[in-house]
Image: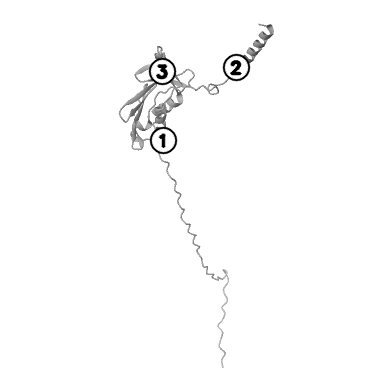
Amino acid sequence: MKPRNTLILVAVFAVLFGYVWFVEAPKTPAQLGTPTPPMPVVFNLKAADVKSIEIRDLQAPRQVTVTRAGSGWQVEQPVAKGADAPAVDNAVSQLVNLQATRVLTDTTLFSQYFITPTIEARLVMSDTTSYAITVGNKTPDGSDYYVSYTGDHSKVFLVSTIDIDTLKGWLDTPPYEPTPTPTFTPTTPPTATPPVTETITTTQTTTAPPGIVPTLIPATETPKP
């Protein structure tokens, strides 16, 4: 091959390499048309089928149990009381659709993820089937928790702290129905009664100065005929 042709091929190769390196390489999978793999699913259940949700503290004797009551919810433990339905609905929705950011399948060092198990979250469905997860330590960067199915340590999920902290918060503040704020009804002040003005009549009495004898004015005499 002639040296000139060789130089041309080298130049073309350099141009192609530069295009791939500086243009194609920085693109994301979405930009390149490569589908992004879906996030691993921990639970994929229907919220409408959930009969009750239980959050149990694995470090202290505390438990919160909330059961469905008609179209709303009722807190059964620690104290039987009406539940904050929107808050419970939101928590149940997050749990039945719980996703992980990552899955660890090599669980030979499983114990290191659960040195201090924190809580167990359990869903009891309308057909009495239950699904539960055990939450262990946080990841070193604090963004996720190590989570596994209760009684099944074949895989470990990394789940966002946002999803788990909501449930852990129930142990300190159960989702009771908020106490309604009393409505203030202003009262109309009584109509003020104008003060009664007392008119005092003063009778002036003429009194002679002390030490002076008043002069008697004689009565007018009738002239004699």
Q: Amino acid at mark 2?
A: Val
For the residue pair 193 and 164, the one nearer the viewer reads as 164
Which quarter of the image is occupied by the C terminus? bottom right
Instruction: Evaluate whether residue 173 shows in this view.
Output: no
125 or 137, which is in the foreground?
A: 125
The residue tagged 2 is 20
State how far apart marks 2 and 3 are (Cα): 38 Å
Q: According to the image, what is the colour scheme of the structure?
A: one colour
**Dot placed on the residue nearer the N-terminal end, 1 or 3:** 1
**Picture coordinates of residue 138 (x, y %)?**
45, 20
Q: Secondary structure at mark 2?
A: helix
Near-viewer residue (5 or 83): 5
Residue that numbered label 1 is attached to: 86
**SS class, disc 1:** helix
Q: Residue 67: name its quadrant.
A: top left
Residue tagged by mark 3?
156
Q: Amino acid at mark 3?
A: Val
